[in-house]
Amino acid sequence: MVNSLFLLSCILGQIAPLDVTKYTPLYSEQGDHAWDGVHQAFFVRTFTTGETYYHRLSFDVPWTDFRRLSNGEAEYQAIHKKLGAIDQLPLEQMEAAPAIRRLIFFRDLWAVFEKLNGMVSKERGVELRQRVARIMKRLELSDDEISRLPDTLVLLHDPRQFPDAPDSANREKPYLPTTILSEHSEWITLATHNRVEGIEELAQSAPAHTKSVNHRSLFYIKIRYPDGRSRIVGLIDEL
């Protein structure tokens, strides 16, 4: 359940104040799961002052050069030990684990894999990328598992999660329209146009956000015009 909530929170973005100094286990209640050990090693940053930084809704690791792994032998050996613990997990805790759990951990490791490419110590970076890649291979979902993943938007349409319409008395309260992804919805996706080698193509509406995570996640901006969909479409056509 905790993993499903994490996935939903990633889609919605931050909806409540967060304590960014406390690690929140994802795969076990006490954080003693081997997956939590690796996730914490890469996504929690400890400063020389002893302060820590962790944001559970982050789409990326909080740094890119991994200096402590490049220069510190103890830290380097420690992460190898954590990765080794995952290598030793039996099939039922890896390939046969629930698809949603594997999907979330795969997503996290994907970010780590890409960032390790910029590691100061290239030799260590290559070695760690190879180990992370082997773990990702064990986590891969089949086409059938992907097709049966839960529709998070449907789950969020439960009135107990988010109301369908804004609260006029509290405009800061999150809400989620049930028609937001419908073909003829009053909510329209903003998009930009890119011109590459003389070819104009439609691009996503938040290219900087999407590029910042190397297209591992896609971001879109939806707007609703007070006079209705037909009116805003007409205005766009006039531009």
Image: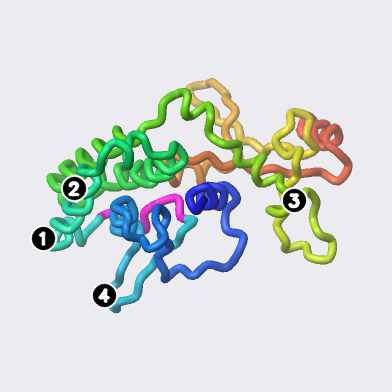
Magenta-colored stretch includes residue 28: no
The residues bearing labels 1 and 3 have C-alpha atoms spaced at a distance of: 51 Å
The residues bearing labels 4 and 1 have C-alpha atoms spaced at a distance of: 17 Å
Main SS of residues in magenta: loop
**Nearer-N-terminus badge (2/1):** 1
**Nearer-N-terminus badge (1/3):** 1
The residues bearing labels 2 and 3 have C-alpha atoms spaced at a distance of: 44 Å
Q: Dot 1: within a 10 Å radius of its alpha carbon, few (fewer than 14), some, or many (20 or more) residues?
A: few
Q: Nearer the viewer, residue 91 or 141?
A: 91
- Give the quarter of the figure containing the C terminus: top right
The residues bearing labels 2 and 1 have C-alpha atoms spaced at a distance of: 16 Å
Position of 169 with respect to 81 (left or right) is right
Task: Give the residue number, with chain letter if any, for mark 1.
Answer: 73
SS at badge 2: helix
The residues bearing labels 3 and 4 have C-alpha atoms spaced at a distance of: 45 Å
Residue 215 can be seen in this image: no
Q: Dot 3: within a 10 Å radius of its alpha carbon, few (fewer than 14), some, or many (20 or more) residues?
A: few
Name the amino acid, label 4: Thr
SS at badge 4: loop
Residue depicted at 49% across the width and 70% down the height:
19
Rendering quarter of residue 49: bottom left
Q: Are marks 2 and 1 in contact (CB under 8 Å)?
A: no
Q: Give residue 123's position: percent from left, percent from top.
A: 12, 45
Q: Which mark is residue 84?
A: 2
Task: Give the residue number, with chain letter if any, for mark 3.
Answer: 159
Residue range in magenta is 58-65
Magenta-colored stretch includes residue 63: yes
Name the amino acid, label 2: Gly
Q: Residue furthest right?
A: 227
Residue 33 can be seen in this image: yes
Q: Dot 2: within a 10 Å radius of its alpha carbon, few (fewer than 14), some, or many (20 or more) residues?
A: some
